[in-house]
Amino acid sequence: MKKSTEISAHILFWILFTLQVFSQARLFLEAKPDAPFGQSFAWVILLELTMGLIFFYTTFLAVPRARKSKGNLAALSAVLLILLLVFAWPAMQIGSVQVISSVAPHLQLILLAVIFRNSSVATKQ
């Protein structure tokens, strides 16, 4: 994949992800206005985007190294699990549905990062 195409794909992906985060946060806060973070919509958006960037690019940049050995794959898995636990900790204080709704989008980002990395590596070969 040409570098300009890859950059364009990343930009488009993050625009779509931002729109998704915005709409999901808005729907959630409309359904549950008494949520602990309900008064700070902008903070929720910023936090979700930051977490998304961390999960996506941690995975995206580490996939080539993880392919080299099982130890690297285990280390990447451990880092991602620790990140999931850290980011899910506030939701753990509320309930299991909130934990699932907190973790599921980030698992999707991890999967998308692996797919994106594999497709960009495959087209370079």
Image (tube, rainbow, N blue to C red):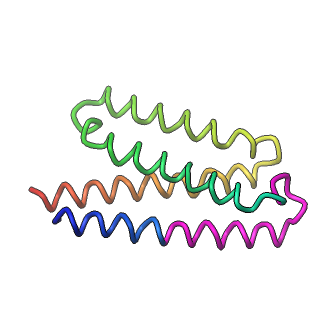
Among the 4 quarters of the image, the one containing residue 58: top left
Residue at 22% in and 59% down? 120
Q: Toward the viewer: 34 or 42? A: 42
Among the 4 quarters of the image, the one containing residue 77: top left
Place of residue 41 in the rendered image (x, y in percent of width and height, measured from the top left) = 74, 62
Residue at 81% in and 41% down? 93
Question: Where's the N terminus, which quadrant?
Answer: bottom left
Residue at 35% in and 48% down? 60
Place of residue 106 in the rendered image (x, y in percent of width and height, measured from the top left) = 54, 53
Q: In this image, 41 relative to 54: left or right? A: right
Q: Which residues are magenta?
A: 16-38
Residue at 30% in and 43% down? 63
Dominant secondary structure, magenta: helix
Q: Toward the viewer: 47 or 125? A: 47
Q: Toward the viewer: 37 or 72? A: 37
Q: Is residue 86 magenta?
A: no
Q: Is residue 33 magenta?
A: yes
Rendered view: 92 above or below 104 = above
Place of residue 42 in the rendered image (x, y in percent of width and height, measured from the top left) = 70, 60
